[in-house]
Image: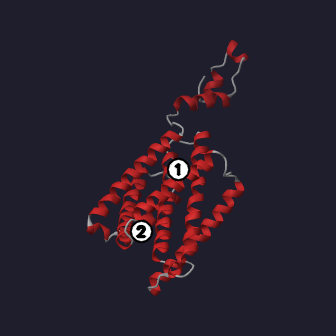
C-alpha cells in the first residue's frame, strides 16, 4: 500500500482488490511511520522549566553580586517585556528567544531584588519564600481539584488579567511622567498589591491546566517550551507582586 492514492489503487489487483483499504487509513499509518515528532509530556515540560530557571537564577545571581549589572534592571524590564510579547504572539516556538528572555529577566530580578534588599533588609528572602509557598499551595489546590479550571474560570481570569495589565501600564506611565509613586504609594497601595499577587497566584492554575491538557492531548513536543515559558512568566509576576506588597507593609 502506498501513501499515493493513485498508486495505491493501481496495486490493488486480484485478492487485494476485494479487500480494498480505505485511503484515510493508509494515510494515517503513513503519518505514524514518517512522523518524527514526539508528543508533549509533563516531564519534558518540567525539564524545560528547570532549564529556564537555571538561566534566570544565574543571571540574577550575577546581577546581585556585580554592582554594574544592577544599573541595567530598568532597561532589562523593557527588553524582557519585548521578548515576552515576541514569544507570545509568534506562531513559531523559539527556544533560543525564551532562554534569552530568562537571562534578561534574571538581570531585572537581580537588580530590583538588590534595590529592595538595600531598603528593607531580609525582604528578598521573605519574597522568595512567599512565592514558593504560594505556588505550592496553588498546585495543591489544582491537583486535588479544589480549583476547577473550566471555561468560566478561564474567561473570568482573562478579563481580570487584561484589566490589571491596563491598570499597571497606566500607573507606570503616571509614575514616569509625574515622578510620583502612583497608586502603590497611596493609602490603597497595599490593596492594589494584594490584588496583583492574587491574580498572579490564580493564573498559575491556567498554566498547570495548559501543561496537563497539552500532555493529555499529545500536543507537539515543541509546545513544552511555550508552556514552560508561560509558567515562568507567571512565577516572575508573582514574585514581583509579593516583593512589592512586602515593601508596602514594611514602609507602613
Please name the residue shown 51% across and 54% down the image: 133
Query: Vertical placement of 220 versus 58: above or below?
Result: above
Front-lying residue, 101 or 73:
73
Q: Is residue 216 left or right of residue 94?
A: right
Please name the residue shown 48% across and 69% down the image: 246
The x, y position of residue 217, in whole percent, is 62, 40
What count of labels does the image hold? 2
Please name the residue shown 57% across and 55% down the image: 204
In primary-sequence order, the first of circles 1 and 2 is 2
Q: Which residue is mark 2?
A: 77
Crowding around mark 1 (Cα neighbors within 10 Å: few <14, some 14 to 19, many 20+) is: many
Crowding around mark 2 (Cα neighbors within 10 Å: few <14, some 14 to 19, many 20+) is: some
The x, y position of residue 7, in whole percent, is 61, 26
Query: Vertical placement of 165 versus 15: above or below?
Result: below
Query: Vertical placement of 4 versus 111: above or below?
Result: above
The x, y position of residue 17, in whole percent, is 70, 17
Q: Which residue is mark 1?
A: 227
Quadrant in which the N terminus appears:
top right
Amino acid at each position: 500500500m502506498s501513501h499515493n492514492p493513485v498508486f495505491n489503487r493501481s496495486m490493488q489487483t486480484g485478492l487485494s482488490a476485494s479487500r480494498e483499504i480505505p485511503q484515510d487509513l493508509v494515510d494515517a499509518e503513513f503519518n505514524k511511520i514518517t512522523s518524527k515528532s514526539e508528543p508533549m509530556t509533563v516531564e519534558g515540560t518540567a525539564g524545560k522549566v528547570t532549564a529556564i530557571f537555571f538561566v534566570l537564577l544565574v543571571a540574577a545571581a550575577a546581577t546581585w553580586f556585580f554592582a554594574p549589572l544592577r544599573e541595567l534592571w530598568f532597561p532589562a524590564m523593557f527588553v524582557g517585556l519585548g521578548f515576552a510579547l515576541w514569544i507570545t504572539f509568534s506562531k513559531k516556538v523559539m527556544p533560543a528567544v525564551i532562554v534569552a528572555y530568562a537571562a534578561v529577566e534574571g538581570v531585572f530580578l537581580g537588580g530590583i531584588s538588590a534595590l529592595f534588599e538595600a531598603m528593607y533588609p531580609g525582604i528578598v528572602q521573605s519574597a522568595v519564600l512567599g512565592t514558593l509557598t504560594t505556588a505550592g499551595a496553588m498546585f495543591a489546590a489544582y491537583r486535588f481539584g479544589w480549583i476547577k479550571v473550566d471555561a468560566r474560570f478561564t474567561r473570568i481570569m482573562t478579563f481580570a488579567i487584561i484589566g490589571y495589565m491596563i491598570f499597571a501600564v497606566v500607573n507606570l506611565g503616571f509614575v514616569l511622567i509625574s515622578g510620583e509613586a502612583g497608586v502603590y504609594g497611596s493609602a490603597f497601595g497595599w490593596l492594589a498589591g494584594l490584588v496583583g499577587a492574587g491574580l498572579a497566584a490564580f493564573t498559575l492554575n491556567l498554566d498547570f491546566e495548559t501543561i496537563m491538557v497539552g500532555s493529555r492531548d499529545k500536543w507537539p513536543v515543541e509546545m513544552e517550551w511555550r508552556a514552560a515559558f508561560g509558567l515562568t512568566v507567571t512565577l516572575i509576576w508573582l514574585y514581583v507582586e509579593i516583593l512589592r506588597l512586602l515593601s508596602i507593609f514594611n514602609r507602613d
